Structure formats: structure tokens, C-alpha cells
Image: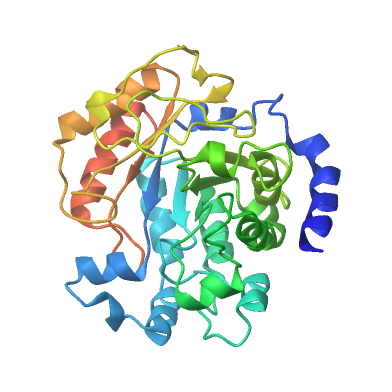
Amino acid sequence: MIKKIYSTIFLLSILVLSVNAQNRASWMKDAKWGVMLHYSAAILASENKLDKDSINFDKWNYLVDNFDCEGLAKQLSDVGAGYLVITIRHVGGFFMAPNSMYEHYMGQAPSISSNRDLIVDLHHALDQYGIKLITYVSSKFRFNPEEVKAFAWDRDDPRKAEMYLRWQEVIREFSMRWGDKVSGWWIDGCYTPNTHFRHPDIPNFASMAAAARAGNPNGIVAFNPGVFPRVMSLTPYEDYTAGEINDPSSIRWKFNEDGMIDGNQIQILSYLGKTWGKGDPRFTAEQVIKHSLDVNEKGGAVTWDVPPLRNGTISDDFMKQLGKIGDALGTNKK
């Protein structure tokens, strides 16, 4: 029944959503660069030298309730960032917005969805400065025991088809609620595309993209295959390259022209800290500027991940580097 219902939704939407004829992601080239935040209990605990299990659901709600959307938006505006990428949920942690479809499948299991819809509030704060919002979601997640059952994770099914169909319903609900408040999606975990997504029947890349764009047909989508030094597009159903790179100096450019690779906008994503969401700055200001200019000179956008403070804002050390990027790329408004 689920597959039949989802097939109907998919077929109705695919005529509009499957082709990137208008280059939905062209605005990224104009924006030049953005910032990413991995805001999760595990990362906040690590950065504050806490046991990750010490951040329970009540404490998570307290953190989300006290996330300073206006303060973060002002910081991003000051340095001239054009967009923010933020995790809806990272790894096996909590959500930063409620989702009734997730709760439906989980039944009586304890909720992990925050009371506050942080994405809506972030949009309102960012929109005052013309900063766009992109949400990070995984194509799958590290299941806790309750989720294994609720999302029908079948060890014997190599496609994990039922799991993906149910998870796409969760994504679709988020998209329908947020509409054009969310300008795009960065979908992680697409590490085995042939097994899980390259199929004529759903679930596949097309149905996942349709779920993400359900509330905003102009929403841009990227599917992340993992870390690869050569920038590439994974599927025609995405609009920009996921571009995950650990070492920005190792990027290999091939088959790119005027900011595009294989029909999709170039976007590179890396981190300024020791690793994703953690640590002190690992680059000098000169290195950060060079890496950013190199991507922009190819017509691409560059996204820098920085560690978040407890209230969602960015520390002075990283703000200094972000300010240098904005100066070098000509977007700094101060």
C-alpha cells in the first residue's frame, strides 16, 4: 500500500521535478560561498567535553529552544555568506523539528523530535538578510533498535526498499511544511548508488528528489557519494554537486565549464576546523582565501563547515576566518 500511494505521488510530481532544465542552482554561483553547521548532540557534547549521552531529550529541547537564530543570521550577514547549510538530524541523534510521519512509524517509542521547528525560525531570521537556507538530511541513518523495526530495515533486502520508501515520507513531510522557506537539500549517505538508487522503479534517485522538492519545486538537491577528490555529479536528478572534500588542495577538476559539471552547478564542501563540526581552525587565513578563490574561479560555490557554539552562533576565531573569505570574494557587507 505504501509503495502504491508513493508511486502515485511520485508519478504526478516527476514530470515537473525530474529535469533541471532551468538550472535551479544558478543562484549558488552568484552567492559564491556559504557556511555549514553540524548542530547535533554528539558534536556539542564533544566540543564541550561532555558524554554524548548526557544530552538527553529534555536537554536537547533546551538547546534548540535557546538557539539564537537572529544572532547567527547577523553573523552570516556580516561576513557576506550567501547561504547556510544545517543538519536536520545528524548520524543517530535528535531532530531539530517535529515530524508526524516519523512519529507515526515509531509509534509509542520516545520522541526524538524537538518541540521547536528550528528550520522555520532560522528561515525568518536569515530571510531578513537575503540568506538562503539548505537543509542536510541523510538518505538513511544509523538506526537505533526501535527504528530498525519501525522503518522495516530488512537485512536480507539489498535495496532496503521499504526503509527508503518510509524515510522518503519523512523527508516529504518536512518539505511540504517548509515550502520555499528551504531553498535546497544536501542528501548524505548515497555511498552505494547502484544498489540503492539506480533503479527504474521507486525508491530511486528520482523519488528521493521528488520527496525533497515536494514543497518547493525550485528547491535544489545534491546527493553525496562520499569523499572524492574529483568533483562530479552523481545523477541527473540533482542540481548541484555535493562536493565533499577533506583536503581542498587535492581537488581535481575535469569536464567542468563555466561553473558546471555534467549539467550541474559546482559546489565544494569542506571544513575549517579539525574535522566536521569540531576543533580549532586548521588553516591560515591565506590558505582559506586561496581555497575559496580557487573554487570561485571555476564558477563554483564553496561551503565551509564551522563548529557551532551551544546557542548556534559561531566563535570569534572562526568568524575572523569567515570575514577574510567574505573580503576576498567581495561579499563582506561590513
Determine whether 240 is above or below 39 in the image.
Answer: above
Q: Please give the count of numbered marks on the rendered protein.
A: 0
307 left or right of 221 in image: left
Q: For the point 45% across and 19% down, which residue is it?
A: 299
| 188 to the left or right of 18 | left
| Residue 271 position (above or below residue 137) | above
Q: Quadrant of the C terminus?
A: top left
**Picture colour scheme:** rainbow
Nearer to the camera, 280 or 201: 201
Q: Which residue is drawn at 39% across and 49% down?
A: 36
Residue nearest the observer in this picture, 202 or 177? 202
Q: Residue at x 21, y 66 (%)?
A: 47
* Image coords of residue 242 (percent x, y): 46, 36
**The N terminus - image quarter:** bottom right
Q: In which quarter of the image is residue 98?
A: bottom right
Residue 296 on image: x %, y %: 38, 23
In this rendering, would 244 be left or right of 138? left
